Amino acid sequence: MATARQIPVSTWPAQLAAEISANDQSARTLMDGLTEEQLNWQPDPGSWSVGQCLEHLCMTNEAYLPAIAVALHGQPDAPAENITPGWFGRWFIRKFVEPSAQSKPVGAPAKIRPNQRVDLSVLDRLVSTNEACREVIDKAGSKNVNRIRFRNPFFPLVHFTVGTGLQIIASHERRHLLQAKRVRESVSFPKETSRVR
C-alpha cells in the first residue's frame, strides 16, 4: 500500500523571524534614552555613529527585501526543512557578514552608505523594515529557499538563494548592532545632556 509523501516541516522560518525580533530588541536597547547628538557622535573621523549603523541596516533591508520578494513571486510551494547555503554563500557570510574575528571590514556600496546626520526616527524605520522582513520570511516558508535565486541589488552578477539572502539580513544586522554597541560603550561617548523622546 502506497504511503503519502511527507512534506518536510520547515523549521527555519520561526528561528529566523525570532532572530530578526531579537535584533529589534537590541536596537531598542541601544537607542534607549539617546539624544540626537549622541546618536550622531562618531568615535573617529570617517567611522560610523550609532545612527549611521542603524540607517545602513535600513537601507540594506530596503534594497534586499524587494529583490527577494520578486524572486518568490509565482514560485510553487515546496518547503525546505532548513536553509543550506552553497559554498559561495557560506564563504560570503563567514568572511563579510557574520560578526566574528574572521569577517573582513569592507566599505559599503554607495547605495547603502548612510547620511552624515541621522534623526531619532531611524529606530522606527529599522523596526518597520524588520516587520517587512518577517512578512517575507513567512511567505518564503512554503518555498524551496535553497533553489530560488534573486539578483543581488548591489552586485547584479551575483545571485544568492533566497535562504542565503535572508540569513545575510539577520547576520548583517547583528554585525552592525554590535558595531553600534561598541560606539555607545566607548569611553569618549558624549554624556547625556537632555533627552529627546
Image (cartoon, rainbow, N blue to C red):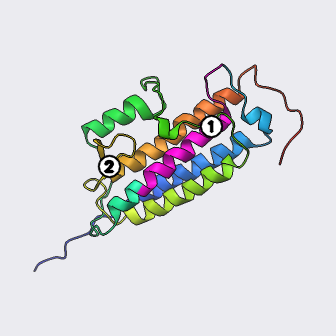
Relative side of 129 to 36, left or right: left
Residue type (three-letter) at the residue carrying disc 2 = Arg
The chief SS type of the magenta part is: helix
- Taking depth in this image into account, of 164 and 39 the one nearest to the observer is 39
Relative side of 82 to 117, left or right: left
Taking the magenta stretch, the answer to whether it contains residue 48 is: yes
Determine which quarter of the picture holds residue 33.
Answer: top right
Residue 142, disc:
none
Callout count = 2
Residue 115, disc:
1
Q: Is residue 180 above or below residue 187?
A: below
Neighbour tally class for label 2: few under 14, some 14-19, many 20 plus, Cα within 10 Å:
some
Distance between mark 1 and mark 2 Cα atoms:
25 Å
Residue at image coords 66%, 19%: 44
Residue at image coords 44%, 59%: 137
Secondary structure of residue under mark 1: loop
- Taking depth in this image into account, of 57 and 3 the one nearest to the observer is 57
Extreme residue in the bottom direction: 1
Where's the N terminus, which quadrant?
bottom left
Residue 12 appears anywhere in the view: no
Residue 71 percent location from the top left of the image:
33, 59
Residue 18 appears anywhere in the view: yes
Report which residue position mark 2 lands on: 151
| Part of the protein shown in magenta | 45-66
